[in-house]
Image (cartoon, helix red, strand yellow):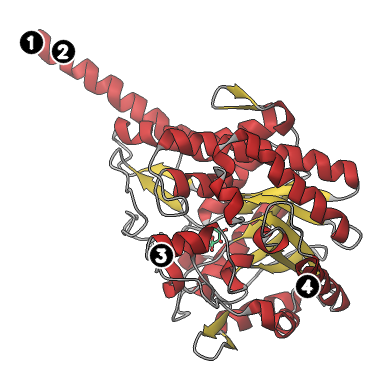
Amino acid sequence: MQWLLVIGIIVLLYSSLVGLLNILFPEKHLDWDNINTDVLNFPETFTWGVATAAHQIEGHNVNNWTQFEDRENKESSGSACDHWNRWQDDHNLLVELGVSSYRFSIEWSRIEPNQGDWNEDAIQVYSDMIDSLISKGIEPMITLHHFSHPIWFEEKGGFYQQQNISYFVDYCSRIFPYFSDRVNKWCTVNEPDVFSIMGYHMGMFPPGLRSPLKAIRVMKNVMVAHGEVYHRLKHLNPNSYVGLAKNVTIFDPYRRWNLLHWLTTFALNYIWNGAIISALSRGKMYGKSVTKVKNSADFIGLNYYTHVLTSPFLPQTTEIDLPSRSHETVTEFGYPMYAEGLERATKWLNKLAIPIEITENGVADGEDSLRPTHLKRHLWVIADLIAKGVDIRSYYHWSLMDNFEWAEGYSMRFGLYHVDYENQQRTLRNSGKTYQQIISRHNK
Ligand code: GCO
């Protein structure tokens, strides 16, 4: 009898705890069948954009990624979209879409191929790109580090070594004055979380290591580098608008009654999201002080793609289908389509009390069967958030055109334009037309 009572009490306590967690941390799902995503109301001041990154589109780079592609026998980025030779035509694609801003990155390995050896010709090409965008009425947003960097930097240990941060700061402060008269919006780094965890823990990005502790150290160093660059750029031009792009992935317990799943969820949400937010808001990260990182952002860029249903048996590679809820559509990348998570992502970022720029959002969808719905659902959530008073100023769709998708090579197609890699022809997809129409409706 007594045993029954003890078991009963344990069950009661357990279910109350799980019940409380479910109330405190609900997993929001909307009834999309009853939401009209064709009705989208955005303020006139809202910025419509698309995003790309240098290594994914330019072609023929020589950097830590090309070195990794060769060494690991990965699909080679090769000519990519041959954007380095075709950027003028590609800028016309931006005009065709009607975007008012374009986020792209500068390839450090082109600017400083050997340490201290500054390539003025490459600087001139980027400068010409900026002029071209401005002449077309498109505001540039520049990312200074989007996953790729010179081989010499990688060989010194990259961001794993704290003393290497100064090389990155030097490159940023060298390049910034060339462009800051014409470019106001700057992302220092792209996704410190993805960069460090994929490269140092999952082994899928260079340098291909598998050590969680190394990943955490790199993430911290990248945030310190961000802080240093932020202060340097603001010193050079106090009016510039400087932030970073943060990937917010929402972790949810796979089984909502399983405490172990909850524990893993809390740990991952902290490692992936909480630590970086804490660095920016409190100057503390993983128990260490990163004082110059505190308040080092005029805006926070949000890259949002999905939520990950979590259990202690986490995937060690992205080449598997992640679990999903039964009603969720799974994208080609294996991600559940979960636009509701964008609202939850902004809750993390609201703690910073600075404007939010959606620096990336999109879907791998070669057939373009999902992208129009994906796009409209996410825009609907953003419009709703703006109506509720959240300070979201822009949306940059990932991506302008299909491109080199890192560890997945060319198999994943994220473009509003389809790219035929045989002849480099770009073709506007239906989703591109949808985006074009949404923009033109709002720009009247
Ligand atoms: C990232 C990068 C992009 C990707 C995009 C699609 O989030 O990994 O910023 O370079 O291509 O997110 O996965």
Neighbor class of circle 3 (other Cα within 10 Å; few <14, some 14-19, many 20+) is some
Viewport quadrant of the N terminus: top left
Specify the quadrant of the image occupied by residue 273: top right
Tell me: 348 left or right of 280.
Answer: left
Kind of element beneath mark 2: helix
Describe the element under mark 1 as helix, strand or loop: loop
On screen, residue 237 above or below 441: above
Q: Is the C-beta of the residue carrying label 2 under 8 Å from the nearest atom of ligand 1?
A: no
Q: Is mark 3 within 8 Å of ligand 1?
A: yes
* Between discs 3 and 1, the one toward the N terminus: 1
Residue at image position (82%, 66%) is 44
First reached walking from the N terminus: tag 3 or tag 4: 4
Which residue matches tag 3? Answer: 333
Specify whether 84 is left or right of 216: right
Task: Specify the amino acid type for callout 4.
Answer: Val
Question: Which quarter is ligand 1 in?
Answer: bottom right
Relative height, residue 241 to residue 439 (above, below): above
Mark 3 vs mark 1, CA separation in Å: 53 Å
Mark 1 Cα-neighbour bin, 10 Å: few <14, some 14–19, many ≥20? few
Question: Dividing the image into 4 quarters, which one contains the C terminus?
Answer: bottom right
- Residue at the top extreme of this rendering: 2
